[in-house]
Structures are given as C-alpha cells and as structure tokens.
Amino acid sequence: MKSKVTFVELKVEILAEPRAISAVRAAMTPEMDDSKRCKLSLHTDKTGRKLSLILSSKDLVSLRAGLNTNLRLAASALKSINAAKSAALAERSQKDSINQN
C-alpha cells in the first residue's frame, strides 16, 4: 500500500552556547545548499542559545534520511567544539599552575 503523505515537516531544537550555535549553523550551511538537489529541504533559525533545524520533505524516507544525516552533523560539530574548548581550558589551567610555581 502506497503512503498518502504529501508533505512532512519536522523541527528539532538544539540548545548550546551562542558561539557554538553559530559554528554549528555555519557547518550546516553546505548541507542546506546540497538539499536543493534532493527531496529534502533544510532551514535553520538561531535564537540566542537555540538552533532550530527545520526539515521538510514530500516523503517520509527522505525526511528520515535527512534527519539522521543532519543530526549526526550537528552532534559531531558540537562534540568537536566541546573537545576544543576542553583542550583550551586544560592548557590554560596548566599554564596557570606553572606560573604560580
């Protein structure tokens, strides 16, 4: 039996620091350009500490695939930002302890 779905839209909100949100949004910009060639449309909206991903498609299969791809991209970008931030904090802490001695 063929699905009767003609349009599906999904909004996912991600909370993080504003600078991280800006970086994640910038990382996702190429995906938004690529989505014009496929069955998925991706738009983002940034409000303070919240990044909204709005995905829309004419079929559920494309929406699911696009959701998986874009959530993994956002998670990977946030993980990289957090790792870089942790490394910078550790380096600063180490320099502070050396300067105190």
Image (cartoon, grey):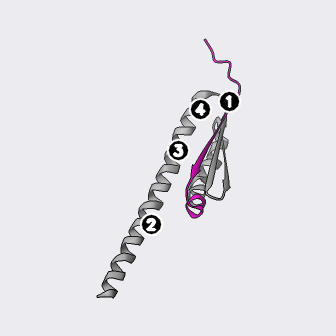
- Give the residue furthest to the right: 6
Q: Are marks 1 and 2 in contact (CB under 8 Å)?
A: no
Q: Quadrant of residue 99?
A: bottom left
Q: Is residue 58 above or below residue 11?
A: above
Counting residues from the N terminus, which is met first, the one under dot 3 or under dot 1? 1
Residue at the image point whose x is 59% and y is 32% from the top = 62
* Residue at image mark 4: 62
Marks 2/4: CA–CA distance: 34 Å
Q: Are marks 2 and 4 in contact (CB under 8 Å)?
A: no
**Mark 1 residue element:** loop
Marks 4/1: CA–CA distance: 8 Å
* Residue at image mark 1: 58
* Residue at image mark 2: 85
* Residue at image mark 3: 71
Q: Amino acid at mark 2?
A: Lys
**Mark 2 residue element:** helix
Q: Which of the pair 62/51 is nearer the observer?
A: 51
Q: Which residues are magenta?
A: 1-22
**Mark 4 residue element:** helix
